[in-house]
Amino acid sequence: MAPRGHRNGQAHTNGIPNIDSLVNFNNHFQARGVDQNGNTQVIWYYNMVGTAPEHHGTTTLNAPIVPVTLDLRNFDGSPRFVNGQPLISSPAQFVQPTVDSPVFQNFTYSSSNDATQLTDAVQRAEFFDRAKPDWHTLLNPSVKTGRTMVLIRGTYRFALNADGSCCAFVLVDANTFGNALFPSTYPFDNSTPVGAAENTGDITTQDISTFLFPNTYLYVNGDPNQCCILGYHTYDLEPGIPSNGNLERRYVLNYSSWISPGLFGGGFEDVTALSHEVAETFNDPFVASDGIRNITPWWLSPNGNCQNNLEVGDVIEGLPEGVYPITMNGMTYHPQNEALLQWFEFEAPSSAISGAYSYPNIGTLTALSPPEGVNCK
């Protein structure tokens, strides 16, 4: 259960009240901007994972990894075969490299005296002026029971591997994917990966959970040419039960695809999507769902994204030097650089490490957005 806190978000030590979810804290900043309706606003509230940086000590969160296999079926739901093989795409070969990646394992960063995980290093960079030396927010990964997502022909596209096996990649309709990932009823519907993992206790409200897919990318508006979503973070909202005091339950999680080399430009490979989603989870665990916390002044990123939320990966995705290669545990990983809180605060100069607006590469994002109106108009 999250600690109780003040509704206005001004208490450093308290998170969002009256929910059953992971530990989180609130704060606010001042910047001149406009809200969704174009009204001037000066005070903006945010909510992040862990405890406030003014506190000593380490917060460690369980981080279940649920591998999800795609079972690509015919129109009538029967198994589909190509070249005599069933169209089954498994993430098995990507699970251990994911666990061994800098998202979950320690590496050396300038923002920490001790080797630490990537997202913790990013958080320490943005709170560098106030974080206690021993303040950390870490993930404890564990691989859980694999789940299967069944998709019906017409809702997906695919390309085979060079040897004719399934699959080099799979494109899935975003609406179909969401409906197939999340439970639609309570008690939990075991037919979906999230519902099954919740029902068995593989993921809990106290965790940051990853549903790991093999080269699985989403398209929108029913058009495979409108591609590609490589991952997203969110939470599954379930009603309270007597055993938790009838508090609403928030299962914080992400869908992330492993990215094999050669499919995308810009250095997008392996854990680029996962690192993006985990960093955004730390900075915005409840996806600005109350319309208050993690709503920011409107901003326009160098890649053309226009938003008004604290999505630290969206600012940088696709930019030159948008990824930060790290060689560890026998391979070179490609996590994404992330924008820092100071960029959303329109703070000049930045109080982050080395006056930065991005991290680990402080040279990726070097200037603030111009002040923007609603929808950057």
Image: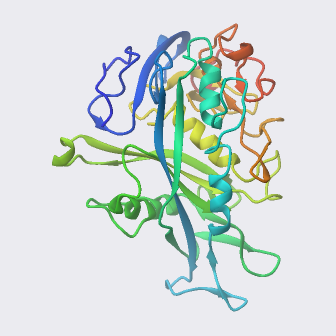
> Where is residue 304 drawn, in percent x and y?
73, 32
Q: Image point 40% across, 58% down: which residue? A: 202
Q: Image point 41% across, 35% down: which residue? A: 289
Tell me where residue 205 sits by quadrant.
top left
Tell me where residue 23 sits by quadrant.
top left
Q: Nearer the viewer, residue 138 or 14?
A: 138
Image color mode: rainbow
Q: Is residue 151 above or below residue 182?
A: below
Residue 222 visible in image: no
Pick the quarter of the image with the C terminus: top right
Q: Is residue 89 above or below residue 253?
A: below
> Where is residue 51 drawn, in percent x and y?
44, 25
Give the side of residue 95 with respect to residue 22, left or right.
right
Q: Is residue 29 above or below residue 300?
A: above
**Most extreme residue toward the bottom, as rendered?**
84
Give the side of residue 257 with respect to residue 134, left or right.
right
Q: Image point 68% across, 23% down: which residue? A: 111
Q: Nearer the viewer, residue 157 or 343?
A: 343
> Where is residue 186 drawn, in percent x and y?
27, 59
Give the side of residue 369 with respect to residue 298, left or right.
right
Q: Is residue 42 above or below residue 307?
A: above
Q: Image point 51% across, 70% down: which residue? A: 149
